[in-house]
Amino acid sequence: MRYLCCVLALLYSFAGTAQPLAVGAASNQYEANWASLDKREVPGWFEDAKFGVFIHWGLYSVPAWGPTDKSLRVGARYAEWYWNRLSLTSKETQGFRDHHLQFYGPGFKYPDFAPQFKAEYFKPTDWAALLQQAGAKYVVLTTKHHEGFTLWPSQYSVNWNAVDVGPHQNIVDSLTRAVRGQGMKMGYYYSLYEWFHPLYKTNVPRYVAEHMLPQMKELVSTYQPDLLWTDGEWEQSDTTWRSTEFLAWLYNESPVGKSIVVNDRWGKTTRGKHGGYYTTEYGKLSDVDAAGMEFSRPWEECRGIGSSFGYNRAEKLEDYSSSEQLVHLLIEKVARGGNLLLNIGPTSDGLIPVVMEQRLREIGAWLGVNGEAIYGTRKWPQAARATTDKTLFMTRKGADLYLISTVFPTKPITLELAGVPASVRMLGSGVALKSRWKNGKYTLQPPVLAYPDVPCQYAWVFKLEGALPQ
């Protein structure tokens, strides 16, 4: 059965004209402007968490295809942009059109994928257990990507959601319950814009007022997320999105006003400037900004294990980062003061690809030994002066300093330290270590271990207790 006609007819049924969000009351703490909103601190749990898992899952998981040519920019390889790429005629998007014509034919439209998104093997408790074993402290699910298909029964997307069509399941509700049951925080990705929403194509202010704002309010009020991860902000200004108005409602009047964490994607000029924490994607603040910048607020790097966020079945093993690379990535981001939000892309039937499961389990095994050097730590600003060795990273927790080596050390390590640590030990090992401090230089002699006694793979941590002044 073809769903195109009925989807286009019913795709965006509205529950009536939405009322403006109430903001600016005298009792409210935050006003609907950036000067006021930016004074709100990011709730502390986020900066302590350090490691989260992103989940991109939607209709794009059915075709599950994107080019793997590394000469293309990363964004041009995103499988979750499948519908959008079919509508473009550039050379960069030719592969999407060729693939669709070959495997689905000219008469098969993107909404026809809806009944094939069945999620018949989706077991939220299994997903949550795996993510907890991976060491994740929070999870972010794509509740609605740019295609507009919601994973909850939104009254603003009738017949274009996972309860009315496809899986016939409230995925947001079931996964939220499972994730929280494992003690993790639950976040929701939400795309501000939709590629082919009739109102967005013809009247953006009406789209914002009658669809986007009330739908975000519905999502927040119904499921009460710990984190709201907006995206698609680059299409319009924050004024057009009415972002400050929504955030004032979120902080002042929503049921999660005191605890909610938000990112910085609220308008075409807000990344790295306004909102909650700052976001980078594959090492970039935006499509033009290079990596290496310093941030005045908590921040987070997001990326896939491969070159796509949505599952891309064209990717081969060499297209995926190794477990070692991912552990090193986590270390590097945390040592710079950030979080890592690592993405997985389940298949349309609800299974997490084995290669992604394996990567998560190995990250979890490393964190099981060395997690205290990651969770709850902060950047140590003097690290660059303490050593120039590019294989050494440092994090701080109170008076303790954690020295992380991404190569197993076989020679003495020397650091510039103002004081003498009270003690030193390798995490996961009980072997006594030798060290000395003289004239501001601290030298640590790594242990000689037989292979069975090596506590972990990929990176090794030395805890220097009491090394820093309180």
Image (cartoon, rainbow, N blue to C red):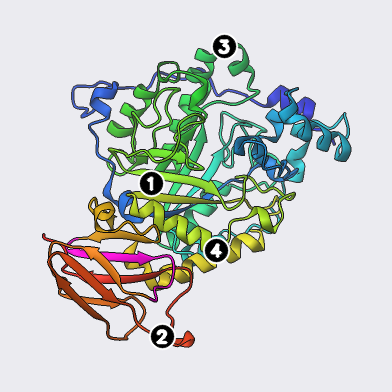
- Label located before the other in sequence (1 or 2): 1
Q: Is residue 406 magenta?
A: yes
Marks 3 and 2: CB-CB under 8 Å?
Answer: no
CA distance separating discs 1 and 4: 28 Å
User: Magenta segment range?
Assistant: 398-410
Mark 4: amino acid? Ser
Q: Give the mark, 1 or 4, whose residue is nearer the N terminus.
A: 1
* Residue type, label 2: Leu
The disc, 3 or 1, on the residue closer to the chain's N-terminal end is 3
| Callout count | 4
Q: Are marks 3 and 1 in contact (CB under 8 Å)?
A: no
Q: Which of the numbered marks, if any, corresponds to residue 449?
A: 2
Mark 3 burial class by Cα count in 10 Å: few <14, some 14-19, many 20+: few
Q: Earlier in the sequence, mark 3 or mark 2?
A: 3
**Mark toward the viewer: 3 or 2:** 2
Q: Position of residue 458 (x, y in %)?
A: 48, 68
Within 10 Å of disc 1 (Cα), the crowding (few <14, some 14-19, many 20+) is: many
Measure how far apart labels 4 and 3 are at the Cα level: 46 Å
Residue 226: mark in rendering: 1
